[in-house]
Each structure stands twice: as structure tokens, then as C-alpha cells.
């Protein structure tokens, strides 16, 4: 009960964090500054176009095409290429203008806007991209923290692998105090990749849910069932020795072989899922190593001989 209460509190905390923190945007200042710089760059380009004579039409058209390319590259985070193109554009423009000043002078000051416009656009998008990257990193960290808090599998509702590792330690302590034995049983479907290819995601999830119900209904109340992966794998902590686990295996074999178990999963088609099972009894040589216990159980995985029921 205490664990279930803790799980509910964790879910409430996660939900609250998503609702409260999601609207906040870290790096907002950099994002806003970048937006202002990009806007300023395009304003300068517009000024150059508006106040230049018709004789500079081709030159302006070329500058517009280049600055548009620079903006697209920078927006798609190809900043290095955008920076190089903006630098080349500015240098060539200055070269052409200096050469023109030697003969005709420089009467149209509006054309100076082309000196600053490319650099402003690139700088602006650099700040925007940096702010977005920072936000993405922050979101990844938050997602990792939330995943660490979550203790249940979203498909089956069972406690997950992290929870199983924690409970193994508790069960070992309980068994040692009461001079009892515990076993870890691992169950996994065969041909998971093929199943995912043939079945829709909803159908595959339905299969996993039905398998979980079979396992939960078969073991005793004091035994604990966990969903250990996203591929229909289950872990069961049994408070018995290997001889007792054999009885559980026999009951599971019978139920997994029941054709009606998968009825209706795929409309107008019958399916049959083959399972593998491995079981290991804890001993002191493992030194409370839950991960090692699971690895040994997985090494013992063997095909369950299904009945023809």
C-alpha cells in the first residue's frame, strides 16, 4: 500500500511538473535577441531595395537571392555554410562598391545596408538555434528525470524493471530473516520482431496485456509480477524454491497454450504466441546482486512446450 501511495504521489508530481514547467522557455532572451537581429537584417535589405535606383536592380536582386539562401541555411542550422556565404557576399559587395566609387563615386548610401544585413541574419539565427538547442537539452534532461520517477509500465500497468530491482533487495532481506527461498522467473515471447511486423501496435499491446493478465492470475498473491521491457517480457519474484517454481511453470504452460487466450486480437485470424521461460533461485553467492540474478534467469530461458488446447 505504501508503494502504491508513493507511486500516485510521483505521478502527481510528474503531471504538475509538465503543467507548470512546460510553458517556461529557457533561453528566451537569446531567442528574442536573435529574432530582433533577423528582423533588423531583413529591414535593412528592404531599405536597400526601396531606396536604390533602377540601375541597381540586378545587383539588388542578386543580393536578395544570396541573403535568402543565407537565411534558409541558418534557419536549418547549417550555420557554418551560412556564415561563409554571408562573408563572401559582404566582401564581394564591398569590392564592387569600392571599385565603383573610384569612377562614379558613392551616391546611394542606402546600398550600405547590404554590408550589415547578411551578418545580422546569420547572427540572429545563430542565437535562435542556440536557444532552441539549449531548450532541447533541457527537455531531454527533464524527460530522463521523469522516466526515473515513473515506476510502472504504461501498457500493462505493472511495476517496471526498475521497481523489480528495488523489490528484489527487499524480498532477499525478507527471505533471509524468515529462512525462506525466493526465485526470479523471466518470461519472454519468441519472435518479437516478427510479431511487431505482422501485428499493429494496438494488437501487439493487446497481446502483452493478455499475457500479463495470465501471469498475474497464475501466480500467488504474495508473488510479484513486473513488466521488464517493451517487448512483452515479464519478471516474477516467487517466494518459493525451484521445485515450487516448477508448479508455476506448469500452470503457465497450460494457460499460454489456450487458443482462446488470443481470440479477437486480430479480426478473422487466429494467432498463437510462443513463450520462453527461465528461472533461478537466489543464493548467497550472488551477494544481493539483482542485475546478476536477472542475467542468470535470462541465460536459463528455454521454450515452453505449449499444449494443444
Image (cartoon, rainbow, N blue to C red):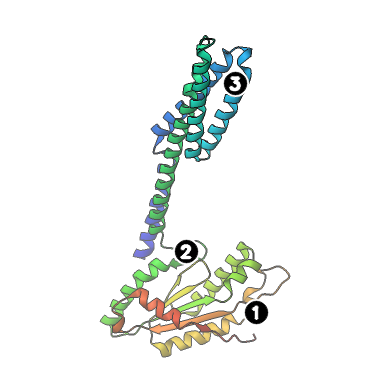
The residue that mark 2 highlights is 153
The residue that mark 1 highlights is 259
Q: Label 1 crowding class (10 Å Cα cut-off): few <14, some 14-19, many 20+?
A: some
Q: Between 60 and 177, which is closer to the camera in this rendering?
A: 60
Label 2 element class:
loop
Q: Residue at x 38, y 87 (%)?
A: 241
Label 1 element class:
helix
Q: Residue 1 carries which label?
A: none
Q: Label 3 crowding class (10 Å Cα cut-off): few <14, some 14-19, many 20+?
A: some
User: Which numbered disc, 2 or 3, marks the residue closer to the eye?
Assistant: 3
Res. 21 in view? yes
Q: Residue at x 48, y 82 (%)?
A: 301
Label 3 element class:
helix
Q: Between 106 and 47, which is closer to the camera in this rendering?
A: 106
Lateral position of residue 151 relative to residue 75, left or right? left
- The N terminus lies in quadrant: bottom left
Q: Label 2 crowding class (10 Å Cα cut-off): few <14, some 14-19, many 20+?
A: some
Percent coordinates x, y for residue 295 in the rendering:
41, 77
Compared to residue 118, the image places residue 180 above or below, namely: below
Q: In which quarter of the image is residue 3?
A: bottom left
Res. 39 in view? no
Percent coordinates x, y for residue 305 in the rendering:
57, 87
Percent coordinates x, y for residue 258 in the rendering:
62, 81
Lateral position of residue 90 relative to residue 305, left or right? left
The residue that mark 3 highlights is 59
Q: In which quarter of the image is residue 308?
A: bottom right
Disc 1 versus disc 2: distance between alpha carbons? 26 Å
- The C terminus lies in quadrant: bottom right
Amino acid at each position: 500500500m505504501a508503494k502504491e501511495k508513493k507511486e500516485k504521489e510521483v505521478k502527481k508530481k510528474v503531471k504538475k511538473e509538465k503543467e507548470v514547467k512546460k510553458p517556461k522557455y529557457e533561453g528566451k532572451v537569446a531567442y528574442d535577441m536573435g529574432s530582433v537581429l533577423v528582423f533588423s537584417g531583413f529591414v535593412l535589405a528592404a531599405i536597400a531595395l526601396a531606396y536604390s535606383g533602377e540601375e541597381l536592380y540586378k545587383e539588388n536582386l542578386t543580393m536578395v537571392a544570396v541573403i535568402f539562401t543565407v537565411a534558409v541555411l541558418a534557419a536549418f542550422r547549417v550555420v557554418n555554410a551560412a556564415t561563409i556565404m554571408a562573408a563572401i557576399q559582404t566582401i564581394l559587395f564591398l569590392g564592387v562598391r569600392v571599385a565603383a566609387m573610384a569612377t562614379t563615386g558613392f551616391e546611394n548610401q542606402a546600398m550600405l545596408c547590404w554590408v550589415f544585413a547578411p551578418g545580422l541574419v546569420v547572427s540572429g539565427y545563430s542565437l535562435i538555434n542556440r536557444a532552441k538547442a539549449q531548450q532541447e537539452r533541457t527537455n531531454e534532461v527533464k524527460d530522463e528525470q521523469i522516466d526515473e520517477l515513473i515506476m510502472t509500465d504504461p501498457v500493462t500497468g505493472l511495476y517496471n524493471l526498475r521497481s523489480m530491482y528495488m523489490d528484489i533487495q527487499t524480498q532477499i532481506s525478507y527471505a533471509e530473516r524468515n529462512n525462506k527461498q525466493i526465485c526470479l522467473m523471466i518470461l519472454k515471447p519468441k519472435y518479437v520482431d516478427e510479431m511487431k511486423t505482422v501485428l499493429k501496435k494496438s494488437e501487439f499491446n493487446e497481446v502483452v496485456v493478455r499475457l500479463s493478465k495470465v501471469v498475474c492470475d497464475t501466480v500467488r498473491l504474495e508473488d510479484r509480477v513486473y513488466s521488464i521491457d517493451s517487448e512483452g517480457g515479464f519478471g516474477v519474484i516467487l517466494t518459493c524454491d525451484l521445485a515450487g517454481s516448477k508448479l508455476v511453470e506448469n500452470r503457465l504452460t497450460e494457460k499460454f497454450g489456450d487458443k482462446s487466450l488470443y481470440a479477437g486480437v486480430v479480426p478473422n485470424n487466429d494467432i498463437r504466441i510462443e513463450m520462453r521461460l527461465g528461472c533461478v533461485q537466489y543464493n548467497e553467492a550472488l551477494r544481493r546482486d539483482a542485475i546478476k540474478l536477472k542475467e542468470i534467469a535470462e541465460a536459463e530461458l528455454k521454450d515452453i512446450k505449449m499444449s494443444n488446447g
